[in-house]
Image: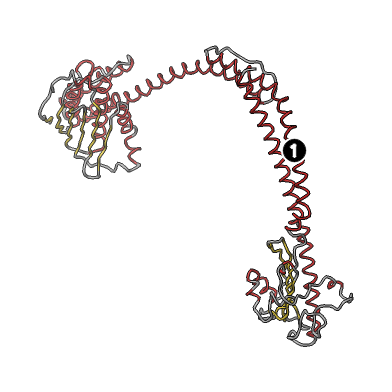
Amino acid sequence: MTRWKSKVRIGMMFSYTGISVAAVLLLETLCLSLVFFVVVFSPRLDATALGNAARIAHAYAQLASKQVGTGSALNPEITFAPNTPATLTPTHGDTSNPDMTNSVPYIVSPYPGSQQVAFALLIAPDGSVLASSNPGAYPLHVPTTTFLSARAGLVAQTLKGEEEQQITVTATGRSGLASVPIFNQGRQVIGAMYVQLPPEISTSSFFTNFAGGFLLAALIVLLITIPLGAVLSLIITRGQLNRMQRLVDATTQFVAGNYTQRVQVTGADEFGVLEQQFNLMGEQLVESIQQRHMLTEQNARLAERARIFRDLHDGVKQQAFALTMQISTALTLLDTQPEAARAHLHDSETLAYQVQQELTALIQSARPSVLSEKGLATALQEYVTAWSRQHHMRVQHHIDACTLPPLMEEALLRITQEALSNIARHSRASAVTLDLSWQQHLVTLLLQDNGCGFDPDDPVLVLRNGVGLQSMRERIEALHGTLQLESKPGQGTRIVVSCPYPHEQERHGEAPLLTGKEEIL
């Protein structure tokens, strides 16, 4: 037997034994608790306690009412003391009232443990004690709220003519109490009778009479459980350890790269489930490897689709819009200014050719043709010049030239096209500023107009600008850059695009092609 198997067997033996002992202890505790709650807190005992308290209270109330006779108030000399003229306690051997056979005892002075003894109080209409079966603990002529504050409301309701019953929880158990009104012959409430009985079965008596024997029996059961659990654990774990060994060997083969390794399912228990899951894991791993290759190809296709969508939106769409504007202007001037209309139609022809070139580039999955042929600086300058002429808007621009990665050049061109398209459609501006510069490893593109501006937090912006702003952000964030949009109603719009300049390109950078500032009118 291997060392690990011996350690596991010893550990499982202690585990089985500990679980057996814990299970027995839990079962014994539950049994003791169940018996305790059934005996001490039984609803039947509560009903019995309430019935006894109510029966005695009614009997006392009847005696007190009889002593009133034709009067309208209780006898101020009434008492619970036996063998006195106005006593409420029946004489020895008096069986005329069977409800009084278990009347409360009369206690002359308080003594330790008196709280467990039944007591009765005759309460005057003003809430004070008129007679008490335990005057030492509940003295006469004292308001009941002094020592029955928790049940002041109950006594008050009784003095209004309502009978009240309640189970109260004390340190020794659950006791029943009853408070019934006392009526004169005119059915007027002249007082109340309050009776509280001790618990039928107290907590201390339960543990004294039952728990001792129960604990002794529980100890004997535990002493038998310990060796029995150890022997059974050695018998039960033998087969399980052998099955575990087979799983260990199979796992070792699996780690070594033998993904065809499988184990025989030898049962329907937890080890059988583990064997099934091991075999399923092997099948799923092979399938996962295949799916990973498929997912990689799918992600590449989705990324290419997203790129083409952005290029269509930021390039072809903007040029198509400009083409539409040129044709619309030409149609407007065709009858009155044919030469001007002809010029716009020539521009339209140029734009249509550019759209064709862009679509060809997209089909060939290449960068925009103008970038491949002329570079970013020249492409930007030509595009801005054409846009300014098409929209009759003055553009002041400054463009630095440097060698940038193709993706960065394409992103900056597309962002410029989208921004200028938004200015033409929404800003009502008369002048635009464009600045492309690079310094200290950072390329910055600034676009600013003097148009009507807008509130960037306005949700209508999303509906008005479509996916334009989101496309611009996605392009520059893909290059680890940022786009800041600043605008206020009536104060124009400012867009600042910043992108980290690649170090290896900086070492081979070129001098600016365009310096200073130029204006296109």
268 vs 140, nearest the viewer: 140
Q: Is residue 183 left or right of residue 249?
A: right
Tell me the residue at 71%/35% (across/down). Answer: 20
Q: Is residue 107 left or right of residue 6?
A: right
**Which residue, given by chain and number where applicable, does mark 1 sit on?**
223
In the rendered image, residue 158, in percent from the top left (x then y), is placed at 70, 74
* Display coloring: secondary structure
* Quarter location, residue 196: bottom right
Of helix, strand and loop, which one carries label 1?
A: helix
In the rendered image, residue 371, in percent from the top left (x then y), is placed at 23, 19
* Quarter location, residue 25: top right
Classed neighbour count for the residue bearing mark 1: other residues with Cα under 10 Å, few (<14), some (14–19), many (≥20): few
502 vs 396, nearest the viewer: 502
In the rendered image, residue 132, in percent from the top left (x then y), is placed at 73, 77
**Image quarter (top left, top right, bottom left or bottom right) of the N terminus:** top right
In the rendered image, residue 434, in percent from the top left (x then y), is placed at 18, 31
* Relative to 435, residue 41 above or below: below
* Relative to 353, residue 515 above or below: below
Say which amino acid is labelled 1.
Leu
* Relative to 345, residue 21 above or below: below
> Which residue reaches farthest bottom?
71
* Quarter location, residue 166: bottom right
